[in-house]
Amino acid sequence: MTPEEILSFPARVLTQTQREHYFEHGYVGVQGLVPPDTLTDLIDVSNEFVEASRSETEPGRTFDIGPGHSRETPVLRRLKRPDDQHDVYWGFAKGLMADVAADLAGPDVVFHHSKLNFKWFDETDMVKWHQDIQFFPHTNYNVFTIGCYLADTDMKNGPLAVLPGSHEGPLFDQYDENGDWAGCLTQADAATIDMSRADYLTGPAGSITVHNCRTAHYSPSSKSPEPRPLLLNCYSSGDAKPYTPHPDPSSHAGEVVRGKTSRWAWHDPRPCQIPPDWSGGYTSIFAAQAGEPG
């Protein structure tokens, strides 16, 4: 569906101005959207998983842990597939966030994946400039990620930053000079980004961020000793069909969360870079950008 067609449907959660901002600039931020009781449930469950991660010694199917992780000093970079890990996460993904998604995808919405990313006051926690769609190409670019801050987020603890309008620009090569998948822009391409234009999406806990799959984005390292959790849920319009293996599918991947199954695919003529074959598994963007195996 075109943006004009999507905007013709009544809004469920977002304002019309917020929807228009997303389509024009490739992102939108909304402060304090998530109800306090829902936010409390998400935070409580997330704290339980941080505690459970203390006993892990290497990255695995559930936890992606960083260098230096220990029981005393956890460095949980990512909880993988939270929608499969606890009903609170899946209820959130198929509930309020799916309504937000319908405001931007149109009436037919497909769930793609979920992840819970952390920052831990560590120089290695910076996420380099990248675009998402090269990880999971679809027939069109009506694919986006909705983030929810589970802690107050400002410039001290590594907010998500986006480059306005980059969703209408080129897709970048996310392989390195040796031909290995890096999951980020090359140094040369990253150097072309005008950092003065970057918009840092800050806000209190319960604020959401939405960025299109073509939008260039990154997040700086945290300067706070308190972890900064960001719960991310990715959706697509019903007529955007994936054509490469899913990097890390949960049991809900491909589930229609609003509307009905689309019987036609819409093909955007703009090309998309193909990632490695993920059918053998995938660790995380942190591992890819750090050059770690897998």
Image (cartoon, rainbow, N blue to C red):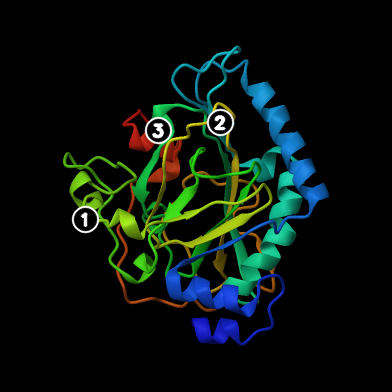
Residue, disc 3:
287
**Amino acid carrying mark 1 in the image:** Thr
Query: Mark 3 or mark 2, which has the lower sequence index?
Result: 2
Residue sitting at 51 percent across and 62 percent down? Answer: 144
Q: Is residue 92 left or right of residue 197?
A: right
Disc 3 is placed on an element classified as helix
**Which quarter shows the C terminus?**
top left
| x and y, in percent, of residue 131 in the image | 38, 55
Disc 1 is placed on an element classified as loop
| Dot 2 and dot 1 residues touching (CB under 8 Å) | no
Residue sitting at 72 percent across and 38 percent down? Answer: 43
Q: Is residue 215 above or below residue 231?
A: below
Query: Is residue 27 visible in this depiction of the protein?
Result: yes
Q: Which mark is residue 61?
A: 2
Residue, disc 1:
192
| x and y, in percent, of residue 85 in the image | 69, 38
Residue sitting at 61 percent across and 64 percent down? Answer: 110
Query: Mark 2 or mark 1, which has the lower sequence index?
Result: 2
Asked which quadrant contains residue 281, the reply is: top left
| Dot 3 and dot 2 residues touching (CB under 8 Å) | no
Q: Is residue 285 left or right of residue 191?
A: right
Query: How many neighbours does mark 2 have within 10 angstroms: few (below 14), some (14-19), or many (20 or more)?
Result: few
| x and y, in percent, of residue 179 in the image | 20, 42
